[in-house]
Structures are given as C-alpha cells and as structure tokens.
Image: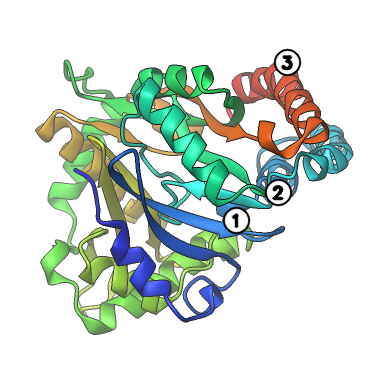
Amino acid sequence: MRHDPAILAAMFAGRDSRTLIANLDAQCLALTLAGEPWAATLSDGPTCYICSPSVAYVDYAIEEARWLLSPPLYRGIAAFARSCRPLVRASGLDRQVQLNNWLFSTNPVPPITPDAAAEVRDTLIARYPDRAIVLRSLNARSDAVTMTALREAGFRLLPSRQIYLYDARDALPAMTRDLRRDLKLSETTTLHWVENAGFTGRDYADCAALYDGLYLGKYTPLNPQYSVAFIEAMHRAGVLRLRGLRDDTGRIVAFAAMFEQAGVLTDPMIGYDLTRPAKDGLYRMLTSSGIAEARARGMLLNMSAGAAGFKRYRGAEAEVEYTAVYVRHLGRRHVAAVRAMELALTRIGVPLLRKYGL
C-alpha cells in the first residue's frame, strides 16, 4: 500500500504549515522520483523534530533522557547532547529536502532499489543543490535492501532511536501473558469500541485533546502539535485509520490513528484520558488492538520508540532506527560533520540506547 502524496501537498498548499501543525515550519510537496510518487518536505532551520535533526538529536534527546533516566545519568547525557549542537549545526542537515515525510514520528519507507537510490539522489541534487537529502524511519528488519541501496548511493546512515517491532509476517509470535490479559480486557471493557467509519465531526476535537494531553502535556511540546483540522483531514483522506473507545456519554476517551504503508503498520498518534483510573487499561487496549490487527493480517507493526518494557512484554523486539542523509554535494565541512555525527552516534549513542532501552 502506498498513499498519494498529492493529498498532503494539497492540504498544505497556500497556507502556513503552523496552521495545521503548530510547531512545524515546512513546505509539503508531492514529487515523482525514479517513477514513483513521494511525499516530501522542505525546511530551513530548527523546527519540529520530524523536519529538524538538530531538535531530534539534541533537544529531544535531552527531554527523553529527563523522563527515563536517573538525575546523575540525565545530567551527563544532557551535557553530551548539548556539546554536540555545534556539530549538528555544522552538518547543515536542518536545511533539507526530506523524502517520504508524512509528518509522523514513524513513516514506513517504500522499497528503494540501487538504481532508484542513485536516480533519486541525482534528481534531488539537481533540483535542490543547497539542501541536505534526508530519509527517516529506516531499520534493518524492514528496510535492509533499501539501506544497502542508499549506502551504495553515498548516503550515511545515522542511528536515531531504538524502536520496537512486532513481526507477524512469517510466523505469529508467541502470545505473552501480558498480551493475553490486554486482549481479554478489550473484550470485557464496559467502554464502547468505535472503528474507523464511526468517527464523526466532534470526535476529532476529542482526539486532538487526548493526544495533546499525553504527547504534549505529559511528555514534551517538542512532539508534533497536530491540529484538529490536520487529524480530520488525514482521516477523511484515508491516510489515517482511527479506532478508539467511547464512554457512555458518547465521548471518545481513547484513540489510536493507524498509518499503513509498504506492508508496515504504525500508530503515529495515540491519546487517552489521563484522568481515568489505570485499571481501565486504555493504553493497554489501544496497543493490543494494533497487535491483534498485525497478527490477523500477518504484518509488521512498528510500535515506535518509548515504553520499552511494556512493548517487550507484549512480544515486540528492539531494533535501531536510522536516518539516511546525503551531503556530499554541500562540501567538505558538511561531509566531515556528518561523519563525526555518525561515529559519535554509533559508538556512544547506540550502546546507550541498548543499555537503557531508550
């Protein structure tokens, strides 16, 4: 499955991107490269991390360490991340054209052959000679062929985060005790499941408020600040599929938005009522419903980053995610900075990700 990028380009055409995603300053495009349609973004400086490596590798890393690590360890990692800011700035990666950017934290990547990788590279260099070329959301389990093709075309692969994959493609993973309990809860809950077609006008505002409370309030405002209009437009266009739970008053109290592409499922938006008691198990039910779909359809579910222990106990496995970048056309300073980033992230960042389950 591959979505039409013209949907995204039309949505943002002629308007400030911040009217749809409040902390994003970028231009959205639909490009045809190597005979295939691609969603793409152009951005020129620090903005939301989905378009800004400096925010992703420095600011967001500091925030994530603050949530997950002890104060002494947090202070050490934060100091290291801040010391890397000049290096990331020197790389020029914030002035970029980003391919396959659907404006989510996770964007499953359609396969790219070696010939296509070279053609994409050359076309983008000719069209955007002063911009870095960026492609996020790559991992060895689902993108091994693409990663090899990009390396052969001169891209560098920068480790970005540790994600969790539930792989039901070739064989069903063993049903863990925790997953079994979650699925049972989904069957016995007194809340009311609502599937994609059941979401109507007022529900989009509920979804946006639930997402904001979790991702922006509980976690960090560095996460994408999606508007009601963006969620509604992406759902009505069929880019996102919604599922959720209503209470007896008809209000949405939990939801997940699923994005499917290139044979991979992912939930880039989740939200639930943080004021309800933990025994309601809202997050558990949302997560298990995504796993149930992956099992039923024999697919790979990319569960993104975070909640490491929770996801492992449901059968997901850790994998390092990479961002592919190409800067050779920008000059030696950019190349040297990217190589230094790659070295630091590989030798220091990846061991930390694996040790602390970040």
Q: Residues within 10 Å of mark 3 (few under 14, many from 20)?
A: few
Which amino acid type is shown beneath numbered disc 1? Tyr
* Residue at horizontal 67 percent and vertical 17 percent from the top: 351
Vertical position of residue 85 compared to residue 345: above or below: below
Which residue is tagged 1? 219
Mark drawn on residue 347: 3
Q: Nearer the viewer, residue 83 or 213?
A: 83
Q: Position of residue 187 (x, y in %)?
A: 13, 48
Residue at image position (27%, 77%) is 203
> According to the image, what is the colour scheme of the structure?
rainbow
Cβ–Cβ under 8 Å for marks 2 and 1:
yes
Q: Quadrant of residue 143?
A: top left
For badge 3, the amino acid type reads: Arg
Tag shown at residue 63: 2
Q: From the viewer's perspective, is the residue at label 2 or at label 3 nearer?
A: 3
Identify the residue at horizontal 16%, vertical 16% (top origin). 171
Other-residue count near label 1 (Cα within 10 Å), few / some / many at <14 / 14–19 / ≥20? some
Q: Amino acid at mark 2?
A: Glu
- Farthest residue toward the bottom? 202
